[in-house]
Amino acid sequence: MKINKTNIYLLSICSFIFFLAHLVYRINQGRVYEILWLCHISNLTLFLAILLHNKRLVSIAVLWLTIGSVCWLVDLFIFKDISISSTIAHIGGLTVALIVISYFKIAKYSWIDAFIFGLFIQQLCRFFTPEKFNVNVAHTIYPGMDKFFSIYWHYWLFNSITMAFCLFLINFILRKILSEN
């Protein structure tokens, strides 16, 4: 498939469908708040970014879809919580993101925008989601990490630094790959 503006817009519709499919699934489960995980919000962000032809937002969505998909895979192996809509949202979303970023390219400091976006979404989750869902680890230490952390803000700081580094690294790798093509 040749990557042109029409194909990019069609791919954006896929991101929106992935988001909507998972939203419907979560509504039916009574867990609508879980749509606010950064990986799911990033599918919606990618859709809007493409429509607005906004390179910064595309980059933010791509970075978070990459991290979110890796975290989802780890979560999948540990908790065995799988759904078709989540699988499609993560694998489909990441696939669309990686195709789209080859069209838009990625700015050198996109990781900073993505980090700020992530902190913003996490704070929204802290105020608007129930603690029992712990969306974007906005409320408590993630299960299993309590072996290493007993104080939430220590865990939050560790997570924030780790995410900043991962965002930087993915940004760097994508820039290297895309600049060679």
Image (spheres, rainbow, N blue to C red):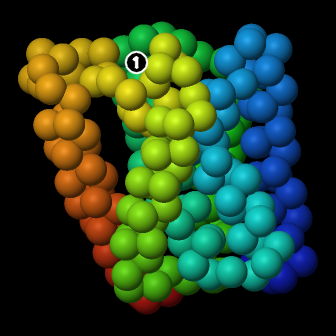
Q: Quadrant of residue 140?
A: top left
Location of mark 1 (residue): 77
Q: Is residue 116 left or right of residue 33?
A: left
For this view, does 180 lie left or right of residue 13?
Answer: left
| Quarter assignment of residue 12 | bottom right
State how many labels appear: 1
Foreground residue among 172 and 40: 40
Percent of width and height locating residue 160? 27, 50
Q: Quadrant of the N terminus?
A: bottom right
Relative image position of residue 38 (x, y in whole percent): 54, 45
Q: Residue at x 17, y 43 (%)?
A: 158
Q: Is residue 36 above or below residue 61?
A: above
Residue 143 placed where, x, y %? Answer: 30, 15
Residue under the point 66% across and 34% down: 35
Any part of residue 163 in sight: yes
- Element type at mark 1: helix
Where 76 sits versus 112, above or below? above
In depth, the one of 152 and 94 nearer the eye is 152
* 126 on left or right of 141: right
In the image, what residue type sits under mark 1?
Answer: Phe
Disc 1 residue crowd, few under 14, some 14–19, many 20+, Cα 10 Å = few
Q: Would residue 174 be visible to someone looking at this image? A: no
Residue 99 occupies quadrant: bottom right
Residue 131 vs 114, above or below: the answer is above
Residue drawn at (77%, 61%) of the image:
47
Q: Position of residue 24 (x, y in %)?
A: 83, 26
Which residue appears at 77% of the width and 42% of the height?
Answer: 18
